[in-house]
Amino acid sequence: MLAWALYDWANSAFALAVLTAFVPVMLAGAWNDGAPSTVTTFRLGLANGLASLIVVLLAPLLGAMTDQARRRKPWLALFTLVGVVATVLLAAVAPGDWPLAMSCFVMASVGFFAANSLYDAMLVDVAEPAEFDRVSAYGYGLGYLGGALLFTVSVVLLARPAAFGLESQTAAIQVTFVLVGAWWALFSIPLLLWVRERHGAAAPVTGAFRAGLRQLRQTVQNLRGDRNLLWFLGAYWLYIDGVYTIIKMAVDYGLSQGLSAADVTGAILLTNFLGFPAAIAFGALGTRIGPRRAIYLALAVYIVATALAVFLTTAPQFYGLAATIGLVQGGVQSLSRSLYARLIPPEMSGEYFGFYNMLGKFSSILGPVLAGTVALVSGSQRVGILSIIVLFSAGLLLLTRVRVPAVRGSSRPFG
């Protein structure tokens, strides 16, 4: 279990330092060619959307292939390598060269999301159904802590670059990209060496592609007849869109409202340090009251926080909202993963989690592009951020339609 969870520790450094924090900062600063903030927001949204579209097209077939071959780890290693290399290359992008920066960013994001889809599917290899909430939350908790620790180093470098022999804050961020790549690669090793895959049809690797295509067609037919699973996937598609849009656009939004880079990165760091104990607590809460009810609570907090973000004007307000999000962000992510694991056949977890991540990334095409487009058309990032409330509310409503099965060996439903 620890070896599996350490992959969350490894790749969360990318999610926090690159995806959430420093790519928006560099896009608005060193990589900018003089464009206004609404244009850089639009560019960021398009880059996130393109990466998500690639994963949408890739994830289900990749999951089906790896289910058939029972070989998720080699593919996970490959996409991790793609992500690591592309992240390190970000450090070499010249000033003003935003097209090259966005190309490396898209490649790194595809590596991150594709590998993470396979990692999610391995939850059924390391835990029994009764442990899904706790183990999933443990992974997210370690991810928040690991990402926050490396990000702390980055913030120190950013605050006093000269003390470390760096000539500017831009140089400090470039060093951070290299550190993220090394961190991601190093802490992926335990999963690749020690986690054993116990589910799958074990088809020969040479036939896995054809077998995967057949399985994919069959699963699509099965999904059409599984209304309960479709309700969950529809709900997840909507509310996780809001979650990921806030993660990806928070720094850009803070900068657009006049906050300093130090303020927004400090607030993101606070979110992640709070995310470690909060994710663990939500795992326990999900076991006690059921993952669905715990997700209801988290989404309600998101709706209130998003509404309050429209009135944000000062750094303390941004810190307060960041702390609020930190209390629920890991909970909604980890419990969605564990709830979904209860609804699917474990021997086909790779493919089913491919659909799961496909929906998450498909929603991530719409969310950032929606926020960026609304900001561009209206001339206000505040209007763009407000639209996210609709996604949270609609997702919560659909989630009420899902029937949650009892854990094996128990007659009590985990609603």
Image (tube, rainbow, N blue to C red):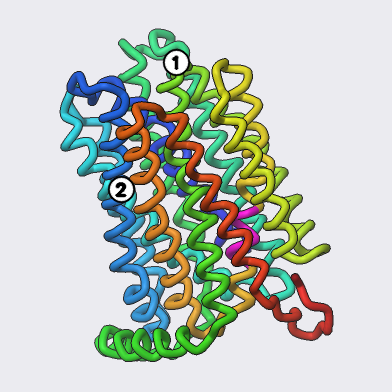
Q: Nearer the viewer, residue 255 or 173?
A: 255
Direction from residue 17 to residue 392 in the image, left or right: right
As shown in the figure, which amino acid type bears the numbered disc 1? Gly
Q: Secondary structure at mark 1?
A: loop
How crowded pointer 2 is (Cα within 10 Å; few <14, some 14-19, many 20+) is rated as many
The residue to which callout 1 is attached is: 258
Q: Which residues are magenta?
A: 332-338
Alpha-carbon span between mark 1 and mark 2 = 29 Å
Direction from residue 395 to residue 15 in the image, left or right: left
Give how far across and how far down residue 320 sits, in percent.
65, 26
Q: Secondary structure at mark 2?
A: helix
Image quarter for residue 31? Answer: top left
The residue to which callout 2 is attached is: 108
Could you tell me which residue is drawn at 21 percent across and 31 percent down? 92
- Vertical position of residue 213 compared to residue 326: above or below: below
As shown in the figure, which amino acid type bears the numbered disc 2? Ala
